[in-house]
Image (cartoon, rainbow, N blue to C red):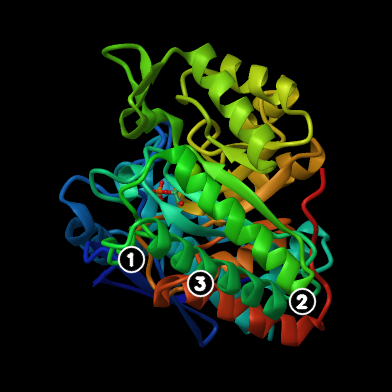
Amino acid sequence: MGKRLERVAARVVFDSRGDKTVEVEVTVEGHTARAAAPSGKSRGKREVVPFPEGGPEEAVRVVRDKVVRLSGVELEGLVAFDRLLTDLDGTPNLSSIGGNTAIALSVACATAYAASEGKRLYEALSELVNEVPALPLPLSNVLGGGAHAGPGAPEIQEFLLIPLGAKTMKQAVEVNVVAYRKLGRLLQRELPDFPLGKGDEGGYAPPIGNRKALELVRAAADETSDETGVEVGVGLDVAGSNVFDPRSNRYALRSEGLYLTGPEFKEYLVDLADEFKLVYIEDPFSEDSPELYADLQRDLRSVFVCGDDLVVTRAELIEHQVGRGAIRAAIIKPNQVGTVSLTVDAVRACTAHGAVAVASHRSGETTDAYISQIAVGLGCKVIKCGLIGGERVAKLNELIRIEEEIGAGKIRRLTA
Ligand code: 2PG
Ligand code: MG
């Protein structure tokens, strides 16, 4: 028997950058759940449109005028609402209701539906995909540049840490925090006048070149491994589409005075990976150069080259790029596709093809922690959700709560 969708409501709220976004409430069989949409700054060209023309205010109007008409329908399953939503939108890129509106509605509805069965969202999702709930390893941004920081910061968008050998979620977070604090001290020693300013995701945003930044992050990771006994891996999100300058056809590393062709930039990354023992490189190149991804992945077999803008959480793109050897990991950002169902498909594509699914926040976030529920429920091995700042810590704290529910020690590993 179906479950009744009783109420849909929306309002404008603010995200961690102070930008407006949409928050919704959905009631299923007397159970109400709330969800709010995050927003990306370094967005892939193939992502769905985040908001209808007119922005979040218009999105709220669309919910009040159109989506409310769905109230009263019977939902035949956890994600049955998604089809109704996409039909109501009627465009291939969700431009009439907006992908951010859609993801908030889709998540809230699935959460309320799960609650009506006495389950948390992660439990209901894990049943849907036949996975045993387990915790993802947290991949934490500790130093940032690119579109998430001001001028003078590194061009590489994110310098990331992953506590590879952590035994519990609590330990994983603790280890990353130890490393973050060590990095702060190393930065102060290196740049005595730098007031430890931060980028959009809470990582330090120092006026420093990419190589120097990586040197300090590596040192912080090594000191932390020695002190805690937990091996800490280092990774990067280059956000290559933003480093690439289409006018000169070069990857522009202004902080280092380097303007490199695609193949030269690939060599630059290979050298960094060897020298600093990288385990993970996300979006190394422009999303229009998948052949460079494949070359890099071939050169760095043990590194997880990960697609974000390249595959935008679309199952068919993930399948294609993993199949041709361009990547061994894919970022899973539900608002890139707009529904929980399509997010499920994307993670399934990773699992089926032996790629690592990396559940991910966006640079503009709220304190909503649904990404943690999705990561656990769908079996993502890694979650990229930042480390410092209320909106980032909200995701980690939710994972600590889930750990209490499923039992300590059920933590996944970074393996293919
Ligand atoms: C990324 C993200 C999140 P944004 O590139 O992976 O870290 O940034 O949300 O701005 O796309
Ligand atoms: Mg990215």
Residue located 54% across and 54% down the image: 217
Quadrant where the C terminus lies?
top right
In the image, residue 392 lies at what x, y percent? 46, 70
Q: Label 2 CB, ligand 1: below 8 Å?
A: no
Which residue is denoted by mark 2 in the rendering?
168
Q: Nearer the viewer, residue 191 or 128?
A: 191
Q: Nearer the viewer, residue 242 or 333?
A: 242
Q: Nearer the viewer, residue 191 or 165?
A: 191
In the image, residue 295 lies at what x, y percent? 66, 17
Residue located 77% across and 52% down the image: 414
- Number of callouts: 3
Which residue is denoted by mark 3 in the rendering?
181
- Give amino acid for label 2: Thr
| Label drawn at residue 367 | none
Which residue is denoted by mark 1 in the rendering?
196
Q: Secondary structure at mark 3?
A: helix
Nearest to viewer (mark 2 / mark 3) = 3
In the image, residue 78 lies at what x, y percent? 64, 65
Q: CA distance from mark 1 to mark 3?
A: 11 Å
Quadrant where the N terminus lies?
bottom right
Q: CA distance from mark 2 to mark 1?
A: 29 Å
201 above or below 325?
below
Residue located 26% across and 43% down the image: 152
Q: Label 3 CB, ligand 1: below 8 Å?
A: no
To which quarter of the image does residue 163 belong?
Answer: bottom right
Query: Considering only order in the chain, which callout, 3 or 1, is on the residue closer to the N terminus?
Result: 3
Can residue 207 be seen here? yes
Q: Secondary structure at mark 1?
A: loop
Can residue 337 be seen here? no
Q: CA distance from mark 2 to mark 3?
A: 20 Å
Q: Nearer the viewer, residue 371 or 302?
A: 302
Residue located 23% across and 44% down the image: 151
